[in-house]
Amino acid sequence: MHKIIEEELEKMCNTNKLSKPTYMAINKLLSKKIDGDIDGVNFSQDLSRVYDLIKEDIKS
Amino acid sequence: MKVSIDKIETNGLRCPDAKIVFKDKDSGASLNLLQMPNATGKTTIIKLLGPTLSGEIRNWGSKMIKSFKSREDVSSGLFSVSILTDINKKKSNIQFIVRFNFEHGTVDFTTSRSETSGEEDGWLPPREIKPYITEGCVDVFCFRGDKVNDLIDSNKSDAEETIKAFFGITSSEDFLQSINTHFRATVSQQANVNDRVINSKSNLLKAWEGRFKILKSDFEDLKNSESQINNDLQDLRERSGRIIASVENGAEEESKHASTVQKHEERVALLSNEYWDTLKNPFTISNELVADLFKMRESLEKMKLPGGSKTFFDDMIEFEENCICGEELTEEKVDHIKKTIENYLGDDEITIINQIKEEIKISFKDKDGEENLNTIFSTLKEAVSSRDKAKIDERNFLEGIKEMSSEENKKIFDEYDKKQIEVIQITGKINNRTKEYKPSGTELNNPASCKSWKAAELAISELSDELGTMSDMIDDVNAHAVLVKIITGCKENSLKRLKEKVRELTNKMILQTLRANSGYEIKVESFDKFLQLGWNGVEQSEGSGAQNIIVAYSFVRAILEEATIQFPLIVDHPFTNVDIGNRRDLGSKLTTLMHQFIGFLIDVERPGFLEGVEKSGDEVRYISLFRNNKENEVYAKKMEKMEQDLYYKSDSGLLCYDKEFFLENSMGTK
């Protein structure tokens, strides 16, 4: 992933008050998508994990 | 990270059977020039190269695959591309092999990941280069000469699409698409359907999902057909172009007509926009209206509006103990004041009225709006009729050439016209399928009436959100909304920054290539959808042929530099629209631009360019490829006298790497 995308992703996560682990999980998933390194099943699992993390951040 | 094209092998296709070996800076020649006589299959090689590198060829339909069959009676064919990669100082030779089955119209795709390893099924590039050789990315470094103009065309967004493809913005858009699909599926599966309203909403959502699938699949089919039609159109354009060029001054006249039509088109577009902007100002509708409004303004001025009086008295009642007359503010007095000031104007109203007065004053100053509007309209009408006349002149010129042509060539012109109509029709259908709006009212309850997959998708998103909120999934809806917001924001902000970065780098590269103080100065002034050219703040719709090419090559180099990756630049017709002086200049610089440049050269590009290239000495690989037939016997005999490593001979093709042979025998497409 290009560093500009990485920086902008971090900024957006901070603005929306998401935690570092959530940012890292989104970053990892987006990286995999950009590099074409993910299949349907893994994507669904990783995405569900991201949603859980976001839900926790919203609650806290 | 570095990638070079090492070898292309063809067999049983519309081009001669051959093994073409290229060089790069490391092997001693960064510039590879390939010339092929008319109808030898240059287009075939170019059309197969990109889709093989990107693996996209695996998705081709049978009609497309069969169209590459050799004229000989063959049932199979082969096209392979070997690339050399240097990733973290580890060098590899990777080969992508496509085997054609012309009987069934299918292809088998295999990859050999090193010189010693065997073939494996599928498209298996190294992980590091995979994101850069997708369909959109390959077009960046492997393009036809006409792509140059697409980058600076204000009606196209090729430049922006290139950035999106190369830096992962397109993948981010796919990512958004995927998370939306995942979310919709989750809501459909998990929403509690015991409630009648939820149940009905859920059924409607399912109906929209079905409609979306139909529309999306239809859209994909249309896109495939569009690609096929565009390929056919390109072929027919080239073929009719060759017929026109065979007539004395034909090519020059055609280009003159095309450029006149384009200039008139641009003027019509400019005046239409100006007219539309003027029309949007309501005061231009009637001068009488403006005059009456000015009278109203004068009346307002005379009324001496009680500026801020309501606010003043409101404050007095709220914060003061005594009235302005000095007497105590009793409850009775406060009530009286409140009633009296009810009709007074407050600060906000006064500001609005003053703004209205100011607007009226400005409009009165420009009160000839109606006349202006009429003048622009008359000018626009004249521009439209001049454009139509230019189009008729162009049509008459082409009809004249057609009349002089053989029956076979007349058919090419007719087919070209038909294809142009097909393009318009299919573009219309695709536009319908991609209209972006949120279905509402009756349409929302009737998915079958929707014709756009994008609208269907928006309906699905809205219904999913509603359904999620109505059931027990509010947390999921909120989390999804946050994720969509983050990815959308990240994508938009990154794209903006990347475009600015590439614009700056492109301008740096342009300065490296243009002759100093040559009067040819140009730069990319701004970059939204396309590259807006200009100089010193003055915008221009295009540069000269040479300037446009320098901008395009600089743009590609800037992208590759920003991505910290070195790719070859493979260009068909690299210098068609460049004058001799600039061709010489560009020719002398090509070896310094990229670590590998492969140019498919045609005859008209040789003068000037080859003289410039000559200055690069041994850094150039000269390649001639032609059919092994009676017509070319004389060339075959010349070749056979050379050292064996300078030529390659197959049943259908002759390939020669000799510089003198290349320079002596001009055989590119005219």
Image (spheres, coloured by chain):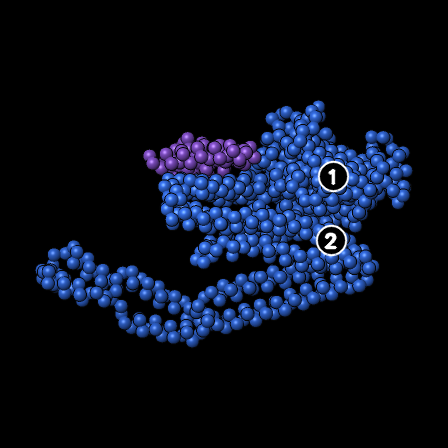
The residue type indicated by label 1 comes to Asn
Where is residue B483? Give x, y as percent: 43, 40
> Which chain letter goes with mark 1?
B
Gap between marks 1 and 2 measured at Cα: 26 Å
The chain drawn blue is chain what?
A: B
The residue lying furthest to the top in this view is B116
- Could you confirm whether marks 1 and 2 are on the same chain? yes
Q: Secondary structure at mark 2?
A: helix
Q: Dot 2: few (<14), some (14–19), or many (≥20) neighbours within 10 Å?
A: some
From the viewer's perspective, is B468 left or right of B273?
left
Left or right, residue B405 beside residue B368: right
Foreground: B262 or A43? A43
Of residues B463 and B658, the one drawn nearer to the viewer in this rendering: B463
Write the residue at 71% across / 23% down. Answer: B116
Q: Name the residue: 41% across, 72% down.
A: B290
* Image x and y of residue B97, in percent: 71, 34
Q: What residue lies at 60% left-to-right and 48% top-to-bottom?
A: B220
| Colour purple maps to chain | A
Image quarter where the N terminus of chain B lies is: top right
Q: According to the image, label 1 marks what residue?
A: B101
Tell me whether the residue at label 1 lies in contact with that at label 2, contact meaning CB atoms closer than 8 angstroms: no
Q: Is residue B22 above or below residue B450?
A: above
Residue B535 drawn at (x, y percent) = 58, 51
- Residue B608: tell me if it is visible: no
Answer with mark 1 or mark 2, whichever residue precedes in sequence: 1
Q: Is residue B396 visible?
A: yes
The chain letter under disc 2 is B
Amino acid carrying label 2: it is: Leu
Q: Is residue A18 above or below residue B344?
A: above
Instruction: Give residue B236's mark.
Output: 2
Q: Residue at x 51, y 57 (%)?
A: B449
